Image (spheres, grey):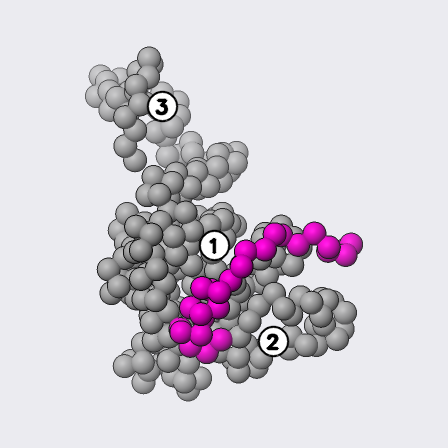
Amino acid sequence: MKDDRRRPFRDAHLDRDTAQHVPQTPQTRSPSYRLAFADDDFLCRDELRPVRLQLELLKFQMLLDENQIDSTIVLFGGARIPEPVNKDQARTKTLSELSHFYEEARRFAVLMTERSRASDNRDFVVATGGGPGVMEAGNRGAAEAGGVSIGLNIVLPHEQAPNAYVTPDLAFNFHYFAIRKMHFLMRARAICVFPGGFGTLDELFEALTLIQTGRMAPVPFLLFGRSFWEGIINWDALAEAGTISPEDLELFQFVETAEEAAKIIDAWTPEPARSDIPGR
């Protein structure tokens, strides 16, 4: 991040570099002598968690501001869904059958990125989790359409790296799931959810809850693949049991194709956040 503002005080970068070349003595080699902001061990202490949370919030926010990105099209979906040409490598028959959603995600990202390019890559910017499967398809479609796209990776116990289609300057890595999910939604112009597993369900229900409770303004909320979603979630049973209101089932729509999703987004009229939420 380049900052050309003039300041009367000495630059932090300069002091950090200078501190690396001080004479080596028992005092200067002591961890206590390290500059606090350049001390990785200090920043990783449990007591510094509030600072780390703030840093993850700020870095993404500042870089998107610097890239003048005003709105995003969020794609959630499974990392295990293969590209159709590789569906024989799927772990299960069901995953193989779901492989066509890779292509729908890719085509949908192409359509959104065409709109994004018309806004000089400021609006309709595709944002994914940056991994394989549906996420790769979304970033791939954006790259094929000649635009940019965002990848919000997270550090996991097993090795993970951004897929090759994420725009390098918009590839991010997170430690905190909560901050990552917050950033997914802060500029969302639409939320599009493809078949997936626990992570996808977590993202889906957190976003739905924010809209349901009036903490987030409604946006097009599109679930790709009615048969999949109705097969794993009995939506009507929630309303019949009274654990949600019947009106809550109107917060999202089922779609099957990229074109159907794009049509809904194009026709969407922004609404204010809900204010008529019954007490909970």
| Residue 45 painted magenta | no
**Element marked by disc 1:** strand
Rendered location of residue 75, percent (x, y): 43, 63
| Kind of residue sitting beneath label 3 | Leu
- Work out which quarter of the rendered image holds the N terminus and state it: top left
Question: Circle 2 is placed at which residue position?
Answer: 233
Residue ID for mark 3: 35
Residue depicted at x 42% and y 31%:
42
Q: Position of residue 7 (x, y in %)?
A: 33, 17
Give the labeled residue for mark 1.
Answer: 188
Amino acid type at mark 2: Ile
Residue 163 visible within the image: no
- Residue drawn at (77%, 56%) of the image: 278
Q: Name the N-terminal-most of marks 3 and 2.
A: 3
Magenta-highlighted residues: 255-280
Going by the numbered disc 1, the residue's amino acid type is Ala
1 or 2: tag closer to the N-terminus: 1
> Relative to 217, is 145 above or below?
below
Q: Residue at x 30, y 19 (%)?
A: 6
The residues bearing labels 1 and 2 have C-alpha atoms spaced at a distance of 24 Å
Front position in the image: 83 or 123: 123
